[in-house]
Image (tube, grey):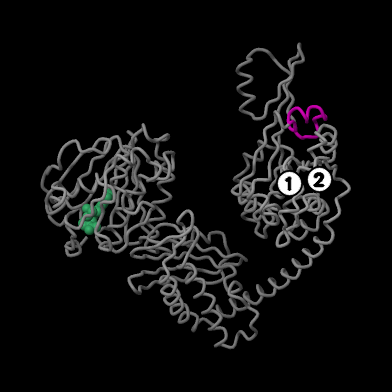
Amino acid sequence: MEKSLKTQNYGADQIRVLGDLEGVRKRPAMYIGSTDKSGLHHLVWEIVDNAIDEAMAGFCDYIKVTLLDDGSVEVEDNGRGIPVEIHPQEQRSTLEVVLTKLHAGGKFGGQAYKASGGLHGVGLSVVNALSEWLEVTVKRDGKMYWQRYEYGKPVADVQEIGDVDDPNISATVVHFKPDKTIFSETRFDYEVIRQRIRELAFLNKEVTIELRKDGQEPEIFHYESGLAGLLEEIAEGDQKVTDILHFSGEQQDIQVEVAFVYVDDFDETIVSFVNSVRTVDGGTHVQGFRSAVSKTLAEVARRKGLLKDNNVSGDDFRQGLRAVVAVRVPEPEFEGQTKGKLGSKQVRGVVEDIVSKAFDSYLETQNEVMKTLVQRALASAEMRETFKRTKEMMKNRLRVESTVLPGKLSDCSSKDVERRELLIVEGESAGGSAKQGRDRTIQAVLPLRGKILNVEKANWKRVVDNEEIQALIAAIGTGVSDHFDYTKLRYGKIIIMTDADVDGAHIRTLLLTFFFRMMRPLVEEGHIYFAQPPLYKIERKRSKDVTYLYTDEELQTFLKKHDGENFEIQRYKGLGEMNAEQLWETTLDPETRNLYRVTVDDAEKADELFSILMGEKVQPRKEFIFANADLVKNLDV
Ligand code: 0R9
């Protein structure tokens, strides 16, 4: 780096001193989220973020990260070096202050773009507090300085340990070993670190980051193409219908960089960042971007006489859009429970302006691209209209048809909704066993004919058209979607009972997706459960004693424990193999059974999987089946 860049030091007096580190050791999770694997890696993010901050401020272009065999990590940057002079209020080295005082950092606003990795710049001292030891080396003004800490406390004062031949060279090296009394997991995962470092290299194209495992060759991450490179990855496998567009600009101290492309698909994917940190819930930068893209396209289309009617919505213009939106904002404000949404108001206008202008002048000369995009938007508008009409029709029908209890429901007698349970059972024969084996006062049974519900072949309309699903809607009583009425719920627990094979897994996915999309409050309020039928029945040959085992691990443990006795082992492939009594004993009896309560997270995953399984694209489906070959193998013995 040029020496001239490095002259703008803030110096010792601008450090704010607010607190010390005992609290961090007492409540680590408050500072790094957790003390498991994720918290452990947070330590690395904190230190690397500091180096990135220095790069964003324009003083650093090379960062090295080394994972050592003793479980320590070393991070080095070639920035200005943390200041070492005596801090006026603290009467000790600024370096020591930064490492031992909570919230010590550059003067507020002094550093233009601070990575906001969740810790508000308290990174160094927090990592120090949670490390068995930490050593910091600073090269600055032709000298080399060094200090060691143990459990956050300095072992001695900062020492000058030598000269640096070239006074233009400056650096900060932080080497630390996490405290094993604090973390439940102390092994760093190379892959996890590699992923984040690659992402940082895409986002900060001026920086080169070197990642190395002890004694091995380093991997070097540097991407001239910046965001466009990241976009290539996001759009991999998609059929592109335009070139990749890459725009950047700066207004009001806000830097904007976007890369986007249109692909032959229906949905829109926007990955967004603020100061190199992913904003999973988007925010004002994403709003500005979306608005710019839609408005500009509509405007240019009208100007060129390609678009006349007004039926095309903003969404129609973003069908098949893949984009990365990254902004650098001096003091960003975040919203939402996980702080994953940018709230800073002024960013929206800045992004919208920069993107609109650049996109407009690009489109002005691109008549073929314009024609393609307008055609796609018109097709999208038409599809949306058709879909809306079908949905209305479907909803009306469901409202009328779903009020009569279905014939195949064997209801229960209790009037207490809390206690009433609906068992949704895959297959007629298991349904039969469940009807006989259940507790008739509180357990109702609705058998489903599995085959009809083949997820891959069904489309969403067919799912809702399906007789079985309509029976389900009628049995539950609440109605669906906009007509959902919680007060009409007929059962406190809705229990899905499917076989432990691929068909069972598919039906489960479909049912979860159905609940998630059409009766979401039931998922959110925890009314949906999975039954946990046993996988194995073990019968002692002589005594005829029977044991049921629910997982393969249980089987392994059991066999080890009873080594040498050779038992009769039966693997249940389907619920239908159990008689009524067995089903009651193993799966239905509220006193002894295990139920799994479905979370919103589970349902979201099912929803995603469902989209993959029944989506238009063959490739993701193939990938899914490939990635889950293990699962399929285990399930379908
Ligand atoms: C290897 C990981 N790197 C760091 O932790 C790191 C912190 C840091 C730094 C400065 C330069 N390089 C750094 N690397 C720095 C910042 C400022 C002035 N001079 C040097 C400034 O922000 O004003 N610092 C981060 C905080 C501070 N320095 C300090 F100023 F608070 F001490």
In front of the other: 139 or 36: 36
Q: Is residue 511 above or below residue 557?
A: below
**Is 621 situated left or right of 321 in this image?**
right
**Quadrant of the snapshot with the C terminus:** top right
Q: Is residue 397 above or below residue 157?
A: below
Q: Position of residue 573 (x, y in %)?
A: 75, 33
Label 1–label 2 contact, CB within 8 A: yes
Residue assigned mark 1: 507
Image quadrant assignment for residue 391: bottom right
> From mark 1 to mark 2, how far is it between C-alphas?
10 Å
The amino acid type of the residue labelled 2 equals Leu
Q: Is residue 98 above or below residue 239?
A: above
**Is 221 situated left or right of 400 in this image?**
left
Q: Main secondary structure of the magenta part?
A: helix
In the rendered image, the residue lying farthest to the front is: 415
The amino acid type of the residue labelled 1 equals Ile
**Is 143 situated left or right of 451 in this image?**
left
Question: In the image, what residue occupies the spot 79% across and 65% down?
Answer: 396
Q: Position of residue 117 (x, y in %)?
A: 38, 53
**Quadrant of the snapshot with the N terminus:** bottom left
Highlighted range, magenta: 573-589
Whichever of labels 1 and 2 marks the residue nearer the N terminus, that label is 2
| Disc 1 CB within 8 Å of nearest ligand 1 atom | no
Residue assigned mark 2: 448
In the rendered image, the residue lying farthest to the top is: 542
Q: Position of residue 437 (x, y in %)?
A: 82, 31
User: Could you tell me if residue 206 is visible in this image?
Assistant: yes
Q: Secondary structure at mark 1?
A: helix
Magenta-colored stretch includes residue 282: no
